[in-house]
Image (cartoon, rainbow, N blue to C red):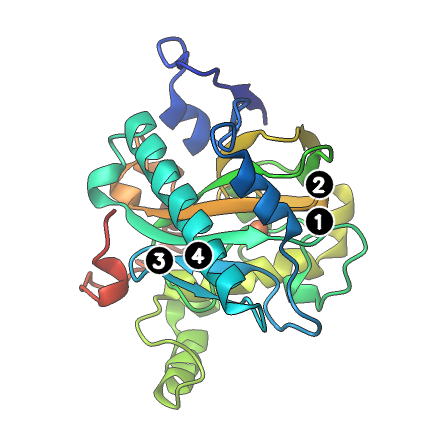
Amino acid sequence: MRAVEVQAGGNTLVIDPYDILETGNILVFPQSFFEDVPQDREFLLAVRPSEGQYHKNIAYRPHIDKLSGFGKMDPAAAERLRSVLRDYSRRVIEFTGKLLPRYQPQWRVDFASLRPLEETGRELPLKKRNDLLHTDAFPTRPTNGGLILRFFTNVHPSKSRVWVTSDPFAVAASRYAHAAGLNAFARGSSYHFRQALAYVRLAPAGRSRYDEFMLAFHDYLKRNQEYQQSCPKYRFEFAPGTSWMVFTDIVPHSVESGQSAVEQTFIISAASLGNPKNAPVAILEKLAGKNLRLAERKSPETAFHG
Ligand SMILES: [Fe+2]
């Protein structure tokens, strides 16, 4: 597990960014994404969610240019925030497209977000806790085997954002996937229950067995004290202004401390990986001996390719 620095101008001739990411490492970009727009950085730093707000992050949806989770923010400030996140999102999409052109034709541009609160000492329900190691899965946005690639930027001028990570998904899955109920998900015994929930609108339709398992595995890892305490750990300090990119479903991660980060998510097709066998869905299908994906179909959420 390592973090590989990519300097401005790129040292992509000597590194293979695809291989670094797909094998469970982190790409780090020391140059600030806000150097040219310091006023945007100042604005993001001052954003605070309103009291008792349900959502832990403020989200921006690039494909419909919409901001959500900002609570009772003054309309002018909300409009400014939408504009700043729109600009960040566009720049990250362009940057990532140049760095990883092989992913772009099939990727789905997902949400951007602002994480305004200090991570240390937050009191959250277990499933939402960021300080416990986990692999990402989205309750409301199934990927059907697609991977979650995230580009983060530490906006804070003096505090590092500190992550702890562990060995990649293949290691965690080989040890814990069966204990987390993989075979039941693969057989569909949990799946049909969830489809019934979808029918009464408690869960989104179109969720594959893979998505169901990844949600369960996210919770399983957070609950598993033996895993939390005994797994190998790697600590990374992302300095103020730094950006980093990582497959957050391949790399188990937790946030130890840090305040004010922005982020843009991409859903990457497993088929566009250099080695598709590194995709969590391929690892799980091999372990289960069964297909865990739904037949592909188009929806408005999957139609935006940025
Ligand atoms: Fe996460």
Q: Are marks 1 and 2 in contact (CB under 8 Å)?
A: yes
Question: What residue sits 25% from the left and 59% below the top?
Answer: 302
What kind of residue is marked 3? Thr
Question: Mark number for residue 231?
Answer: 2
What kind of residue is marked 4? Arg
230, above or below 191, in the image? above
Reading the image, the residue beneath label 3 is: 143
Q: Nearer the viewer, residue 306 or 25?
A: 306
Q: Quadrant of residue 238?
A: top right
Q: Tag 4: Cα neighbours inside 10 Å, few (<14), some, or many (≥20)? A: many
Callout 2: SS? loop
Examine the rendering and report whether any part of residue 10 can be seen: yes
* Mark found first going from the N terminus, 3 or 2: 3
What kind of residue is marked 2? Cys
Q: Nearer the viewer, residue 107 or 231?
A: 107
Marks 4 and 1, how far apart at CA: 39 Å
Callout 4: SS? helix
Left or right of 171? Residue 163 is: right
* Mark found first going from the N terminus, 3 or 4: 4
Reading the image, the residue beneath label 1 is: 227
Question: What residue sits 59% from the left and 68% below the top?
Answer: 55
Question: In the rendered view of the protein, which quadrant contains the N terminus?
Answer: top right
